[in-house]
Image (cartoon, rainbow, N blue to C red):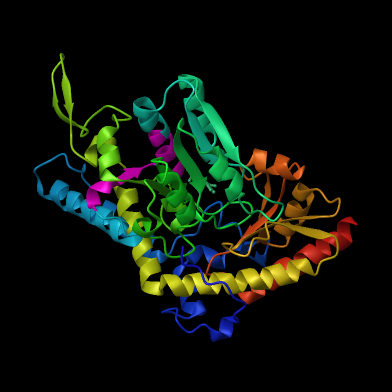
Amino acid sequence: MCLVRHTMQLNDIMKLSKSIEEIRSDFPILSTKAYGKPLVYLDNGATTQKPEQVIRVINELYRTTNANVHRGVHYLSDRVSERYEAARETVRAFINAQKKEEIIFTAGTTASINAVAFSFGERFVGKDDEIIISGMEHHANIVPWQMLCQRKSARLKVIPFSDDGILDLESFRGMLTGRTRIVAVAHASNVLGTVNPVREIVREAHSHGIPVLVDGAQAIQHGIVDVTDIGCDFYVFSGHKVYGPNGIGVLYGKEELLNEMPPYQGGGDMVASVTFEKTTYNDLPFRFEAGTTNFTGAIGMAAALDYLSALGRQAVAEREQALLARATAGLSSVGGLRIYGTAPDKVSVISFLIGGLHPYDTGMILDKMGIAVRTGTHCAQPLMERYGITGNIRASIAFYNTDEEIDALVSGVRKTVEMLA
Ligand code: PMP
């Protein structure tokens, strides 16, 4: 991932194609008042807000172009099918995949990982085989593999990480055996923010002939993701975390591997011919898109990707890095506050706890100040266990956040400490 790591001041960044005021006015929800106070939305890791450009496309689609995709010979069905396939091409170009057929629309990251765990697992995983994940995974990249291991009597192995939140690659190398069938790791941790060295992980796994799935749910929105450069076999992400609608996501898979995998779900559009005796399957990508897909979502997500591209993805990354640096410096100056995840290469996610204060109490008080953060385990219970905590507070920053909002978070945290201490 091409993230810029430095302590650049926001003023030095000239490359966004719009001013911050213009950007914020693209996102109608950002002018919300929460309890009469300006909303400070710092829960972007959970879901991102949507620009007018996305809302408008979805609205316009239902008004002008709604018909079932790939189903009819009529005018509207043709129009919507063209736009759906154009959305696939937008995704392909956005992540630099080699072929459009390698882009499968799913319901989101969770659906994509489950599809691979089931389909790849059916074909390639057997008794006593091994699957490697990391200790900092979201439940979505743990449970589907655990379920697969249960089905197949296979074994799950977990790459440990340091207190800073850095994967132990030495341990990882030692884990690769003749029985390893797949490695599945997050590109960026949703709790620690760590950007994992996925290229190196892929190179290492491939030297043993082992494919790699990269969970990009927390990476795709923060920088330039190039699946050809990473070399991974699968890359997955969700539309709602990249300024698009929810209920839509992507499974990128290398063509030769997808072609060897059985379909995950049966139904309309994924078939070539059906008789009661035998069914033959459609080609990629349709073989993995059974039933009426979320075509509105796919077209809306493509509008979101276009929005980011027009803004300048590198400039977005730089702006978020500057906001992260400001938040890190501000929060670090609060007495008794510990930041979880201090790797040198991070996306704009910052998790913390203050002394003996319960994260839920802190989150509730911040909420009353209009500041939206997430509290709890962030669907990463094993990670919390690794640190011996039951949860923490997470501020996750987007390019539309401002210096003033970061300062409001820091002063809100200070006030909370005064109130609760
Ligand atoms: N992986 C990571 C790293 C995530 O942060 C999330 C969402 N919090 C997911 C997977 C699951 O994404 P979704 O709920 O959109 O399927």
Rendered residue at 24%/35% (across/down)? 287
Res. 391 in view: yes
Q: Quadrant of residue 372?
A: bottom right
Please report the bounds of the magenta region as a residue range: 99-116
**Viewed as shown, does residue 404 lie left or right of 195?**
right
Instruction: Give the x, y percent position of residue 125.
Output: 41, 27
Which residue in the rendered view is the most extreme toward the left? Answer: 73
Q: Position of residue 216 (x, y in %)?
A: 46, 51
Residue 106 among magenta residues: yes
Nearer to the camera, 110 or 76: 110
Picture quarter with the C terminus: bottom right
Total of numbered circles in the picture?
Answer: 0
Left or right: 55, with 421 as reference point: left
- Give the residue at x 12% y 40%: 72
Q: Is residue 59 visible?
A: no
- Please say if 5 is above or below 199: below
Q: Is residue 388 magenta?
A: no
Report the front residue among 67 and 137: 137
Q: Quadrant of residue 408?
A: bottom right
Direction from residue 64 to residue 230 in the image, left or right: right
**Residue 148 place in picture, x, y as percent:** 47, 26
The answer to whether 91 is drawn above or below residue 205 in the figure is below
Q: Where is residue 291 drawn, in percent x and y?
A: 27, 33
